[in-house]
Amino acid sequence: MTMRAMQSEILRLKKERGVLVLAHSYERREVVEIADVTGDSYRLACAAKNAKEREVLVCGVRFMAETVKILSPEKRVILSEKNAGCPMAEQLSAEELAKLKEIYPHAAVAAYVNTTARLKALADVCVTSSSAVKVLSRLDAKEILFVPDSHLGRYCRKRLPDKIFYFYEGGCPVHLQAQKSDVERMKAEYPEALLLAHPECRDEIVDAADYVGSTSGIMDFVKTSDATEFIIGTENTIAEHLRFEYPEKKFIPLSEELVCADMRLTTLKSVLNCLSSGGEEITLDEPLRLAAKRSLDKMIELGG
């Protein structure tokens, strides 16, 4: 079956079954094209919550599907690929976080949304890369234990000098592939290009960037910018999507190593199989779901 034939069959099946298809921005172009909503994990969860459909197919990784289920327990949530995990979300266990809370008993726990439901259940508030500074600035706590991404945490600390931060030294293994030498090489080759970086990148890359923001933020920046050349410091599918959206502009990946293997697991065949045979349903025990929902609710309250 050709790519277009698979896309047509997916569009037919999702309409016939009344399934909402969500795709993270890091997914392949052909997967994004058949999705009803594309964006970061939080936008996808909110879209699912507000949608009329009772069944949701998440083209992304496991923590994203869990977040959808936490906010929409009445809906049937399917993960496009059962093996699609997130190394950062899984690098800190609930038991390890419990020990950190004992070490820093006066600190509020801020958990990046890129975490498992079990970690969200132990957190006081969740944050996204786009909302972290705003949420933490409004959080009624002087001390903050930020997990698991210390790079996003340090990005927040620089902008919130009145807060005291403690970190778990975790991070995204994909974004950490980019090095300062990549910036130097790309800036030398493309001196007029603006560097746009995700805050999960190393500090020296964030400090060198012309713009720092979430995946959605980077794409919005390009939309309103008069510049014509951009070095993209996040997962390389973003450069691919931007080339499609703005063919008159030039987009250069900061590093060819910025590839999320877990996101690439989802293919059109994955989506077609889920719509044909059901796929893996995400389930959460109700006490765990409610505990995890509290930190997400706090994020919504403080971040809007």
Image (cartoon, grey):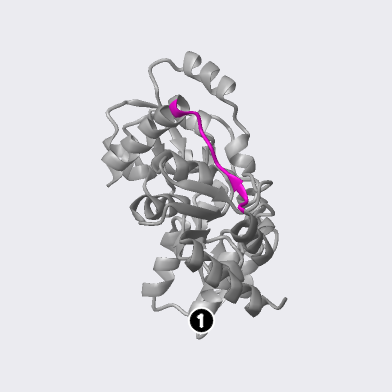
* Residue 184 in the figure: left or right of residue 33: right
Q: Is residue 282 above or below residue 247?
A: above
Question: Dot 1, crowdedness within 10 Å: few (<14), some or many (≥20)?
Answer: some
Q: Is residue 80 above or below residue 29?
A: above
Q: Where is residue 208 in the image (x, y as percent from the top left)?
A: 51, 57
Residue under numbered circle 1: 249
- Quadrant, the N terminus: bottom right
* Residue 137 in the figure: left or right of residue 239: left
**Residue farthest toward the right in the current orientation of the protein:** 1
Q: Kindly identify the residue that appears in the image at 35 percent across and 56 percent down.
A: 52
Q: In this view, does 106 lie above or below 1?
A: above
Q: Kindly identify the residue that appears in the image at 45 percent across and 67 percent down.
A: 219
Query: What are the residue bounds of the magenta stretch?
Result: 278-286
Tag 1: amino acid: Lys
Please tell me in which quadrant of the rendered image residue 250 appears: bottom right
**Residue farthest toward the front in the current orientation of the protein:** 16
Q: Kindly identify the residue that appears in the image at 54 percent across and 35 percent down.
A: 116
| Viewer-nearest residue: 22 or 215 | 22
Q: Is residue 55 above or below residue 104?
A: below
Q: Is residue 138 visible?
A: yes
Please tell me in which quadrant of the rendered image residue 256 appears: bottom right
| Viewer-nearest residue: 31 or 97 | 31
Q: Where is residue 296 in the image (x, y as percent from the top left)?
A: 38, 37
Most frequent secondary structure within the magenta stretch: loop
Query: In the rendered structure, does residue 164 fall within the stretch colored magenta?
Result: no
Numbered-mark total:
1
Classify mark 1: helix, strand or loop: loop
Q: Where is residue 40 in the image (x, y as percent from the top left)?
A: 46, 55
Q: Kindly identify the residue that appears in the image at 44 percent across and 48 percent down.
A: 129
Q: Position of residue 237 (x, y in %)?
A: 60, 65
Q: Can residue 33 be seen in this view?
A: no
